[in-house]
Image: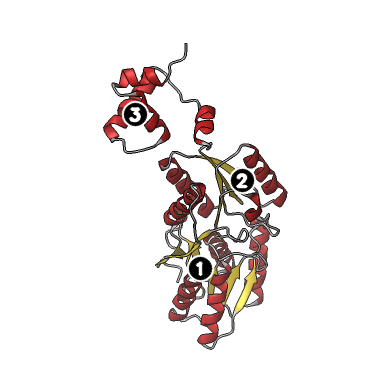
Amino acid sequence: MKPGIKDVAKVAGVSPTTVSRVLNNRGYISEETRQKVYAAMEEINYYPNEIARALLNNRTYFVGVIVPTVTAPFHAEVVEQVEYFLSQQNYKMLLCNSKNQLKTEKKYIDMLRRNQVDGMIVGTHNMVVEDYSKLKMPVVGIDRFLGENVPIVSCDNYEVGRMATRHLLEKGCRNILCIRGNSKLKMPGNQRSQAYIDEMKKSGYEPLILEVPFVKEYVEKQKIIYDMLNGHPEIDGVFAGDDSLAIIVLHIARQKGIRIPEDLKVIGVDGTKEVVGFVPELTTIQQPTKEIARVAVEKLIDLIEGKESQSCLDLPVRLLDGETT
């Protein structure tokens, strides 16, 4: 016979009600009591019936997280933090990698709905976006507009562009190239290039923008950027939309014998642990990935619990001044 809550309570020396409160994360439970219950569960090999809990609480305690790729350092870092903050609220994450394909994204949406997840956190970069506000379920976007009344969480993207451009100007750059993603995508990140344009015009210099779609393969991105730098030898500064693009610029500069930072200054965006660890010399604007994840989870839980939730588009960023500027 499988052990039940009463068996756990007996071994832990607490009441069945206390065990139930621990399992459902309800009410105040001291850490000592919580650990006693967990130890008792392990001792008698007791596992809660997730289906029964879902029926009892009208929740599955599963959240779907859809990202365009799990290989990009920014998305990988955000996903790691999202999983941590969800676990703190007793939720589990179902990770979906859309591989930048709208068809795949829609399949995942259908799959998550069939599995009755309690909500979704979405950070995809597809051209045509499913109107998530029509899904009739809690959804939060990360740096992405997903539909009317869908809360978005992102850093202060205008400040990213302003800070990066001002830094290059103050370092003496006058012919600054801004490398950005597809301008047709509706996302808060568009404010970065807008800030760049504003700062350049304010300083009396002509903006120069190169669009490199996120969905392009590495070799394609490299060719697009190489051709631009080759055709515009006057470029003395590059504001790259993310660190991966900045690293491509550094590789091309080495190939062409361009000295960094003497001949060309480069600044990226994201400042993830991985990039800072492997390319510590890169100057970058660091996004608060941990805070983005925390706020996204917090807003999703609010929606799940029937509370109102507003967008948060101004999480602070900071300059990591490296050797490439």
| Residue type of the residue flagged with mark 2 | Asn
**In this view of the protein, can residue 233 be seen by the observer?**
no
- Mark 3 residue crowding within 10 angstroms, few (<14) / some (14–19) / many (20+): some
Left or right of residue 118, residue 5 in this image: left
- Mark 1 residue crowding within 10 angstroms, few (<14) / some (14–19) / many (20+): many
Q: Secondary structure at mark 3?
A: helix
Q: Earlier in the sequence, mark 2 or mark 1?
A: 2
Q: Secondary structure at mark 1?
A: helix
What residue does disc 1 label?
Answer: 157
Where residue 139 sits in the image (x, y, percent)? 57, 51
Left or right of residue 29, residue 132 in this image: right
Where residue 324 sits in the image (x, y, percent)? 46, 68
- Alpha-carbon span between mark 2 and mark 3: 39 Å
- Alpha-carbon span between mark 2 and mark 1: 24 Å
Q: Nearer the viewer, residue 311 or 107?
A: 311
- Mark 2 residue crowding within 10 angstroms, few (<14) / some (14–19) / many (20+): some
Q: Secondary structure at mark 2?
A: strand
**In this view of the protein, can residue 78 be seen by the observer?**
yes
Where residue 157 sits in the image (x, y, percent)? 50, 68
Dividing the picture into quadrants, the one containing residue 233 is bottom right
Q: Identify the disc placed on residue 41.
A: none
Q: Residue at x 65, y 64 (%)?
A: 185
| Residue type of the residue flagged with mark 1 | Asn
Dividing the picture into quadrants, the one containing residue 183 is bottom right
* Image position of 63 with respect to 34: above or below: below
Kindly check if marks 2 and 3 are in contact, taking CB atoms under 8 A apart as contact. Answer: no
What residue does disc 3 label?
Answer: 18
